[in-house]
Each structure stands twice: as structure tokens, then as C-alpha cells.
Amino acid sequence: MFNLNKKKMESLGDEMKYPLLPLRDVVVFPNMVVPLFVGRDKSIKALEYAMSHEKEVFLSAQRDAKVDNPTPKDIYTLGTMGVVLQLLRLPDGTVKSLIEGKERARIESFEPHADFFMVTVTKSLEKHESDEESLALMRAVIESFEEYAKLNEKIGKELAGTIAAIEDPARMADTIAAQLTLKVKDKQEILQVENLNRRLETIFDKLRNEINILRLETRLKKRVKKQMEKTQKDYYLNEQMRAIQKEMGTKDDFKAELIELEKRIRRKRLSKEAHSRVWQEFKKLKLMSPMSAEATVVRNYIDWILSLPWDERTKDKIDINEAAKILDEDHYGLTKPKERILEYLAVQGLTKKLKGPILCLVGPPGVGKTSIAKSVARATGRNFVRLSLGGVRDEAEIRGHRRTYIGALPGKIIQYLRKAKSTNPVFCLDEVDKMSTDFRGDPSAALLEVLDPEQNVAFNDHYLDLDYDLSEVLFITTANTLHNIPLPLQDRMEIIRLPGYTEIEKLNIAKQFLVKKQMELNGLSDVKMAFSDKAILTIIRNYTREAGVRNLEREISSICRKLAREVLAKGKDIRISVTGNSIHKYLGVQKFRYGVTEELDQIGVTTGLAWTDVGGELLQTEVAIMPGKGKLVLTGKLGEVMQESAQAALSYVRSRGRRLRLPEKFYENIDIHIHVPEGAIPKDGPSAGIAIATSIVSALTRKPIRHDIAMTGEITLRGRVLPIGGLKEKILAAHRGLVNKVLIPEENKKDIEEIPKRILKRVELALVGHMDDVLKESLVIKEGEELFAQEAECEPICLEPRRETEKPVSDEVTAH
């Protein structure tokens, strides 16, 4: 060990003189401790000089490692200042040194010295600030290095964790660069980059290149190894088969198969009944001839029993907050299904044992019924299987065929449980309302046992003829309508209705999910592109008419494809903004129109509200009075219920004739024509009753109806207003159609909670209990006039026939 007296280095202002140690095939980075074996005399003397002074030495790599006596031209000018930590002379005359790199430095000049290179060096002052770019680059480099460490067996797992803990980006960059298996030229390139962000970018590029090379090496090794193993294995097995078959005949194959089957039976955990049955069948199989057809049937039966998950189950995630987060990530809205799943998890966490719930999600197509079932599986940590029941008409599809039939198999329930590989999966029975019945049986009746929590603990498949426990399975069924599902089956399920997305919910879904998804699928992730809210609303209102978002996604995808073509022509640097005015350019002529209220008060024209599978709609109701014989004409493709509502509305008006100042037997000399526009669209339901009655009264009394009022409610003969359904969707349609006030039945007061508060701020809701209240709110009455006659008045006013000079009733409008 050297023990030399220390002396001060020579200093020239900011420049310092240091001994130079030329390096072969190695580049030393700052903060790197490296052992070096030194054999050249000049290099040994340089180290001895450093030890006798401040222990500092300048380290720089040679351009060509083969040169024994390098000149200044053979040495890179940028290197690393180092400190000699240890020096040890070995028996063969060489010296082992331990040197720690400190900082980058540059050679300014070579000073004359007889024994070794002495150089004047300027130290590099690295200044950097942690900005967003450097932080992003750090993360990218650390992630790439972790991937590199997994692929490179020479790098320990601990090193990746140590590097990830380094907060100084410069130190982290140099530490990673030192660990890479690069050529000296490439490492020197990294060392010479003084700008921190550029250095991180260079390291990231090198890392990605090394990762690709390592992946290719791994694939090549696996391929070669697999080919060699397969060739050797095939040869060995073929030779053994030939020898065994020659000596003992083919029967030993069957014996070997029986031995393997017996091992499987002993390893498998089965129920008591299944365990007894499988050993019974195995004993029968051993007595059979391997060539008999019965042996094949028994062997398949045993295989099915052994392949089912009798005691295998996944562990439920009981973290309610995490489950809620996953459900919200995948779906916007759908509050009720989410709450029910979280309630199930909460009870499961407290009781540790709970029968799986059987949920039935009912709603129009495209609202996310099937996809939320997948999200439930992800949130609970369970396996997921989906069975589509659309078009299933054979009971055996559910419960299987008996083994006596040729080619018999278990039913779909058992088949999909084998696919799930656990006894507690999330099992989605899709389109449960699309099953049909024929001479082969009723599959919905077979589902009664499957979906009954009290019976499915011992579900018996015809093929297996064993009791199988389905109580831990979380069944989620989906349907578009309930009326196609038999009542006994409905009784066994918990019905959760998904009414379809409102316009606001569709807007949020498009912004949060659909636009991002389609941009990524169409290669527009790196393009500066934005959809405005008005653009999305234009697509929703004028190019789609649905309860879900499938067509909305298709239209957004269509726009993205056209934009992809535009980007390819003009380059990725262009900025694209899709606005409401530009939608016509991409999607063409509007496909649908959405209702907007009238601009003027009109006689006989009322704005009603309708609910459809695709949301709420404004529904105009028109009434015209003409000379006739008391005939009631109904047009607009009205259903039976709506026709009866019109008749009830007319009966109410006739019964209130005196009160409304109408002449006696006014209806005998006139015909009343009730029409609901958009005649090609079928309409039905009782909720238009008060709208029809209001239009009739307006046409008879010649009083206009306020254009900014809409109404919905069923009418009785006595004028009572009964509750209706779909209130939320109807109010949203009224808001969209610029309606200021909506008349709703008093008994619908409880449903107001479901309506968004920001809608209620813009649309006034008036609760009405009787038709008289509706008329007072909706008809325009001049000052000094009264709609209803006083009870003391006996003679009603006469309804005079219209003169030739008068305008038609339908043309009379009054500004409000």
C-alpha cells in the first residue's frame, strides 16, 4: 500500500494542473467508483504523483484502446475529475487502484512533464433547475432502466430500486449511463453532453435501443432452445413408443392413460358426491376395452368432472373506495347499479359469506349494461364470463343433454364455469329477454333454478347429474325490455332500470371517454385536436337518436377518420378544432330534428311531452274545429291508449261546457279533428291527456295557448290529473326546446329529486291536480275576461259559426 506525503497541486486561477490517466475501454462518469488495473509506467507515475499531492487525477478515455503510447491527439479532451481512494501494487508489477469520479472537466492544454501527462483542466460548472421537462424525462429514463434491468441478467434488482430513489437528475443520469453495456464511443458521447435535458434524452434513446436488442436476443434464444428441445424430445419419445409398442402392444397406452387419470383424480378436490361418482366411473373404465365406444363416453365424463372448478375461487377485493373508483373510471352515471355492487361488497366484507346477488339490468341498447358487468368483475377482482342468450330456444342449452345421447355435452352454464376457472366468477347472462320457446322446451324455465338463490346451491346439470354449487356466482343479467321475460323469472331477479343517458350525460361521456378512445384508435393521439361542447351536442341532437352512445361513438369515429386523412395530407403540426358549425362539413346533412317550442301563442296548439327509448321529446298537439255532425277525428298514428285519452279529454270538455261558456249541444254541429304531427311515428300512452284537453278548450273558446309552456299528465273524466312516467327525460326535453314552464301532476312531486338542479333553475315546474288548474296556467286570458263562468250564470255564451271574412282558427296567433 502506498503511503506518500501529500503536497498541494499547482493552481492557475480557475484552471488547475492535474496528472492525466489515459483509460482504455472504459469511461468513468461522475459519482462512479471504479477499480482500475494500471500497467503502463506513465500511468503508474501519474497515480503516484496524485497520491503524493491532493489525490486528484484527471481521467480521460483513449480514442483507440490499442495504442500503448498515446499522444494528446489520441485522448478525448472531455473527461472526469477523479479522486484516488486506494492504491495497491500487485506482485506482477501492475497497480490496482480504486478511483471515484467527481465532476466533468475539459483539457485546456498539455503541460510539459517527463514522467507522465500533466494537463491544465477547466472544471465544468453544471447548472440545472428541475422543470417539468426534466421531471418527465427522469420518469421515462427510470421506467426504461427498470425494463432494461429485467431483461439484463447482469444487473441486480436492487440497483433499479436504488437508481429510482436518486432525486438529483444529473447524478441519476450518470449512474444509469455507467451501468449500460455500450461502446466507449457511445459512453463518451453521453459524457460530453453537458446540457442535462439533452443528456437525459440521449440516455433514453440508448436505453430503448438496448432494450430492443435484448428483447431480440431473448426471442432468438427461446426459439433456438425450443427447436432443439422439441427435436430431441420428439426423437426420444418416438423411439420409446416404437420399442414399447413392439414389445407389449398398444394396450399399454390405455394403462398409462389410466395411471395419469388416477393421479388427476387423487389431486383434485371434489364435493363428496362428485368424489364418489368419479371413482365409481373410473372403476368401470378400468374394466372396459379401450376400443369400446362406452369407454370414450366414460373418459369424457370423468374429464368434465375433473376440469370443473369445484373448490377453486378468487379472493374478493373488499376495498369499497377502490371498487367505486374503478366503476367510475369505466362508466359515467349508472348510479343505481354501482350502489348495489358496492352494497354487496360492503356486506361481503362484514359477513365473509354471502350468496351472490342476481341483478337484472334493464334498459335500451348502448347504455352500458354488458360493459358494467365487466367493470364489476374488475372492481371485485373476480373472473368474468359472458353468455349470450339471444336466440336460445332449447332447454338443453342451459341444462345439457343426458349422457345416453351421442355427442352429449353439459349445458352452457357448466361449460362457461369451466372457462371461468373459479366457483365465484361474475357471470353475465346477456339478452335474457331474447330467448324463445319451441317444441324442444323453454330455456327460461331452466333458468329458474339457476337464478334462484335458494335453489342454485345444488344446480343439477343433465349431463353431469351432480349437484353443483352456484351460490357464490355473481349473476348479472341484461335485457332491453321486461315484458318478454316470464314473471316467475322476473321474481327471482333484482330489477335495476337503466333509463338511458340524458343529453348532459352523453356530452360528458363523449368528452371523457369516446373522443379520447376514437382519437387513439385513429392515430390522432399526438395531434392537437379538440371537440367543442357545441360540436358534440350538435351530433347528439341532429345526427343520433338513441338512448345509449353507440351511434354517437360511430359519428365521432367518422369525424376522426376524415381528420386523419386531413392530418396525413397537411402534417401532424396542424391544430384542429371541431366546432358546431363544422359538423356539417364532416357528417353531411342532418339526419334528425329535435323539438323546439313554437315562437308565438296559437289557438288549438299545445306543447306536450313524450318519453321514448331514446329520451324525451316535445310533442305538439293540434286541434281544429269545423262544421260537421259531432264526429271526433284522430290522426297521427295514435295507439289505443292515446285514442282513449282523447275521448276522455273530449268527454271532460263536454261535461264542463257550461262552466267554459260553451253553448248547449255545441258538439252536435261541429267535427273535432285532433292531430299529433310526425304521423309516421307510432305514439301511445295516457300522458298526453291534459295536452289534448287544453287544445280542445283553446279551439272551442278561441283563446290562445302560451307557447312557452309544456305539459304532461293523464286526464280522468272528472278532470283529475294523474301521474306519469319518464319525468326526468321529459323535463330535459323541455329545457332543450326552450320551454320556460312545465305543468306536471302533483303526484309526480317525488320524482323532482331526480332532475339536475341546474335544469330546475331554468325550467319552472308547476304542480297541477285538476284540469281547471291546467287551463288557468296555459290559456292566454285578456284583462277583464274570465275563463270560467260563475255558478250563478245559467245561460252559456253561444258559439257563433265562423264568418267567411274570418281567418281560419289555426292561423290565429297572439304574441305573448
Image (spheres, helix red, strand yellow):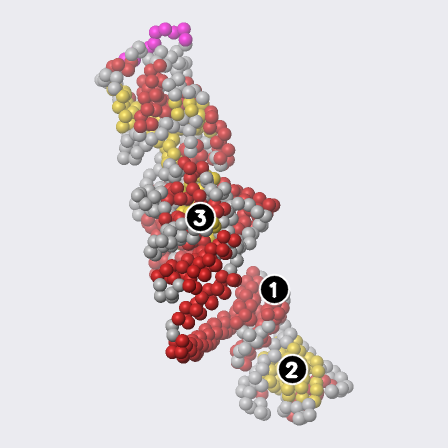
Q: Name above or below for residue 225 compared with residue 750.
A: below
**Amino acid of disc 1:** Glu
Determine the secondary structure under disc 1: loop
The amino acid marked with disc number 2 is Pro
| Residue drawn at point x = 37 percent, y = 44 percent | 443
Percent x, y for residue 286?
43, 64
Q: Position of residue 365 (x, y in %)?
A: 38, 44
Is there a contact, CB below 8 Å, between mark 2 and mark 3?
no
Seen in the picture, residue 50 relative to 543 is either above or below; the reply is: below
Of circles 1 and 2, which is in front?
Answer: 2
Q: Quadrant of residue 707?
A: top left
Q: Is residue 289 magenta?
A: no
Residue neighbourhood size for the residue with mark 2, other residues' Cα within 10 Å, grouped as few (<14), some (14–19), many (≥20): some
Q: Residue furthest front?
A: 287
Q: Which residues are magenta?
A: 791-800
- List the residue tagged with mark 3: 460
Task: Decide which of tag 2 and tag 3 comes sooner along the chain.
Answer: 2
